[in-house]
């Protein structure tokens, strides 16, 4: 199978890290002579058999004839900047054995990241750490983030070397709440990485 027939991704349906496999190519519905508006390829997840639609981005279609677009479409799988996938790939895998409220919060993080809403994703990661404090130590709801992190620190819930990272999430979350600037993707991904690590360690690996 050609590498043009596979996309390494996190399936937007089941949340597993997989190689999506090309199913077919379809080209329909043309405006004028030069601009096909529905050029896409369908890729199938080998785990859940759901389809993801690869669509060449608009700037690569405009001003090109059908033959050029079809060539670009076939080669786009090697350059994620050239296409969109629908449903979009998740930024991190889903996790097993999470309590219902934490699973719901993690799903919100993943869906925000899927939509490139990185500020919202990072803010939800703070809420997840609050959820963990409530779940693990029966803390009251409605306290501020610092109180939850302090409790987690006192209980030595995190390795000491991780506390500066956790505190960094607090500081960045405060800036995201009060500043006009949005959270850059690269920064948010680091926060998601840390949150994923904590969730996986506490709930998935200890089950």
Image (spheres, rainbow, N blue to C red):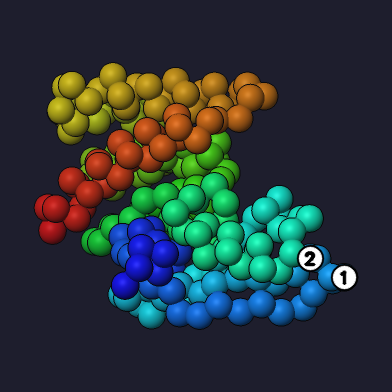
Residue 154 is situated, as x and y percent measured from the top left of the image, at 19, 24
- Image quarter (top left, top right, bottom left or bottom right) of the C terminus: bottom left
Q: In the visual, does 47 lie left or right of 22?
A: left
Q: Nearer the viewer, residue 56 or 95?
A: 56
Provide the residue designation for mark 2: 35
Residue at image location 67% in from the left, 24% down from the top: 180
Residue at image location 22% in from the left, 25% down from the top: 162
| For residue 187, above or below residue 200 | above
Residue 137 is situated, as x and y percent measured from the top left of the image, at 23, 40
The answer to which image quadrant residue 7 occupies is bottom left
- How many angstroms separate mark 1 from mark 2 (CA)? 6 Å
Q: In the visual, does 127 lie left or right of 136?
A: right
Residue at image location 50% in from the left, 59% down from the top: 75
Identify the mark at residue 94; answer none if there is no mark: none
Provide the residue designation for mark 1: 32
Secondary structure found at label 2: strand
Q: Nearer the viewer, residue 117 or 205?
A: 117
Residue 51 is situated, as x and y percent measured from the top left of the image, at 47, 76
């Amino acid at each position: 199978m050609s590498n043009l027939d596979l996309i390494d991704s996190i399936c937007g349906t089941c949340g597993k890290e997989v190689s999506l496999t090309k199913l077919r190519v379809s080209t329909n519905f043309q405006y004028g002579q030069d601009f096909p508006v529905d050029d896409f390829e369908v890729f199938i997840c080998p785990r859940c058999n759901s389809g993801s639609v690869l669509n060449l981005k608009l700037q690569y279609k405009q001003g090109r004839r059908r033959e050029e677009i079809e060539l670009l479409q076939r080669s786009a799988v090697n350059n994620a900047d050239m296409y969109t996938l629908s449903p979009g790939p998740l930024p991190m895998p889903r996790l097993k054995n999470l309590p219902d409220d934490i699973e719901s919060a993690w799903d919100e993080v993943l869906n925000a990241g899927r939509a490139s809403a990185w500020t919202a994703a990072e803010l939800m990661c703070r809420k997840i750490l609050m959820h963990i404090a409530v779940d693990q130590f029966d803390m009251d709801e409605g306290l501020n983030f610092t109180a939850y992190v302090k409790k987690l620190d006192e209980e030595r819930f995190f390795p000491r070397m991780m506390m500066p990272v956790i505190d960094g999430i607090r500081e960045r979350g405060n800036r995201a709440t009060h500043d006009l600037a949005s959270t850059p993707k690269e920064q948010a991904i680091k926060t998601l990485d840390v949150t994923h690590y904590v969730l996986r360690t506490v709930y998935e690996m200890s089950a």
